[in-house]
Amino acid sequence: MLAMAQIQDIRFLQKFKGLSLRAVSKETGHHFETVQKYVEKEDFNLSLREKQTRKSKLDPFKDLIDQWLNDDRYSKSKQRHTAQRIYDRLKELYGNAFNVSDRSIRAYVTKKRPEILDPCQCSLPLDHSSGEAQADFGSAQFIERGTLYDGYYLVLSCPYSNGGYLQLFKSQNQECLLEGLKAIFEHMNGSPREIWFDNEFHHSRCHT
């Protein structure tokens, strides 16, 4: 293929100087067919061959593998197909006609299984308004004046601001709850508009 500068010379001599194709060939030293080609050529973009998709030996068996993996959605985890079990079943069904390596089966199953078993991976965004809080009681060990106690803690968390406040108690009852909330409100110099009570409070809520 000629350089673009050479092509421009050929076209200039023919189109603007009016030389014949044979005269241009003699002037430039290029073959007559080459001169004719570039004088008549309009599109100088390189034509790219369409990329060919290489067929895999596994292609004829993919539908059956997908079917088995899809059936696994309704089976217990221990009863689901492993890649080795799929390979063995295909060997049993097709014999010598099945000429795919177990490595190829493992690679395909590893890629395909999540798509089939969990086709819609989605999540709900956690959106908390300001003024909301959540109260939880939990058990903990703590040391008071050198003595280790098995006690409880009340935590009031504020998801909107990602803040949290903690109170420790030796018991877990309504009196401890009210005392703990009072201490936290005094420390905050305010109170949330709404509190969600979880765990032992049976997922209830109250407005303050």
Image: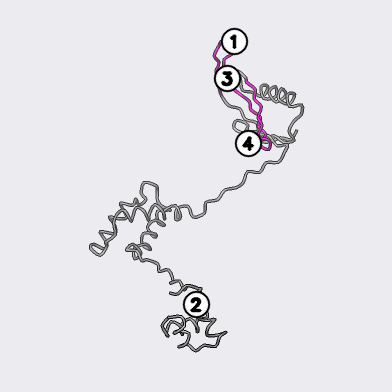
Alpha carbon separation for disc pair 1 and 3? 14 Å
Pick the front one: 148 or 173: 148
Tag 1: residue type?
Arg
Disc 2 vs disc 1: Cβ atoms closer than 8 Å? no
Assign a secondary structure to mark 2.
helix
The crowd level at tag 3 (other Cα within 10 Å; few <14, some 14-19, many 20+) is some
Query: According to the image, label 3 marks what residue?
Result: 151
- Which quadrant of the rendered structure holds the C terminus? top right
Residue at 51% from the left image edge and 76% from the top image edge: 44
**Dot 3: what SS?**
strand
Q: Which residues are magenta?
A: 140-168
Give the mark, 3 or 2, whose residue is nearer the N terminus: 2
Which mark is first along the chain, 3 or 1?
1
Q: Nearer the viewer, mark 4 or mark 1?
A: 1
- Mark toward the viewer: 3 or 4: 3
**Gap between marks 4 and 2 measured at Cα:** 81 Å
Residue type pointed to by label 3: Gly
Which residue corresponds to mark 2? 7
| Along the line of sight, the residue nearer the viewer: 70 or 75 | 70
Q: Secondary structure at mark 4?
A: loop
**Residue 34 drawn at (x, y percent):** 43, 82
On the image, the x and y values in percent for residue 29 come to: 43, 81
Image disc number at residue 203: 4
Image depth: mark 2 or mark 1 in front: 2
Instruction: Answer few, some or many: residues within 10 Å of disc 1's Cα (few below 14, many 20 plus, some between 14 and 19).
Output: few
Q: Amino acid at mark 4?
A: His
